[in-house]
Image (cartoon, rainbow, N blue to C red):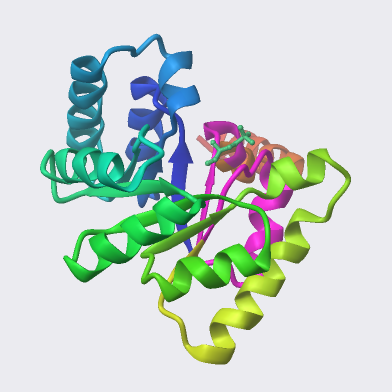
Amino acid sequence: MKFFIDTANLDQIKEAQALGILDGVTTNPSLMAKEGITGAENILQHYRDICEAVDGDVSAEVIATDYEGMIKQGEELAALNPQIVVKLPMIAAGVKACKYFSDKGIKTNVTLVFSAGQALLAAKAGATYVSPFLGRLDDISTDGLNLISEIRTIYDNYAFETQILAASVRHTMHVIDCAKLGSDVMTGPLSSITGLLRHPLTDSGLAQFLADYAKGN
Ligand code: G3P
């Protein structure tokens, strides 16, 4: 299972990268705005900086909602670095643009996916990644994990190569449940990754080991 961090915060990206378990980064316009990154040139430079900070795939989202605009922006983003994955919204123009980029060998991530049917379309369009937003489904009392499970079944039925990128992951249990369901990737905040480290028995066990060692030295 690949671990992506879902942020545009460079410090957090570097912290996750330093752990040695990071496989990539996802961003979106809201996450960019949260870091105060505005204006086309600054946004492009920020993507360059993120690519420099990590080894893996970096999803960069188009803002255009028409096909021609998506192609123009997607090509500009893809030209920044081979690590860039062009992130496209799940609308008709996004599906069409996904097919265009996958035919050209450019990696894609179809985002804002909330149903199995949408995920099927993304796979048909050759998406590298599909991003079902599980936390946002949970937010409206709909079982987000069930969507991951449905997509897993459908993709396995037809051996689709599109990777399921569980997005809108909010906490450690989402990560563990996605792993149980066979999600290929998860993307979440730094806390959803570092939270996996914690167990009180690890802490008390280590304290005991160190105390016992100190007695004999
Ligand atoms: O990767 C999608 C993600 O950024 C959405 O997360 O927490 O805003 O629903 P959230």
Count every numbered label the image shows and give the total.
0
At x 26% / y 31%, what residue is drawn?
50
- Is 177 or 121 nearer to us in this picture? 121
The image position of residue 8, as x and y in percent, is 39, 26
Q: Start and end of the magenta stretch? A: 165-192
Left/right placement of residue 169 relative to residue 165 reads right
140, above or below 106, in the image:
above
Left/right placement of residue 192 relative to residue 125 reads right
- Is 192 or 155 nearer to us in this picture? 155
The image position of residue 130, as x and y in percent, is 49, 60
Report whether residue 104 is seen. Answer: yes
Residue 143 is drawn in which quadrant? bottom right
The image position of residue 147, as x and y in percent, is 71, 63
137, above or below 155, in the image:
above
98, above or below 134, in the image:
below
Left/right placement of residue 80 relative to residue 15 reads left
- Is 201 or 88 nearer to us in this picture? 88
Left/right placement of residue 98 relative to residue 188 reads left
Ligand 1 position by quadrant? top right
Q: Which residue is the extreme one toward the right? A: 141
- Is 64 or 146 nearer to us in this picture? 64
Residue 135 is drawn in which quadrant? top right
Please say whether residue 177 is one of the residues in the magenta stretch.
yes
Q: Which residue is the extreme one toward the top? A: 36
Report whether residue 180 is seen. Answer: no
The image position of residue 172, as x and y in percent, is 68, 45
Please say whether residue 211 is one of the residues in the magenta stretch.
no
At x 64% / y 69%, what residue is drawn?
117
At x 60% / y 43%, what residue is drawn?
197
At x 11% / y 43%, what residue is drawn?
79
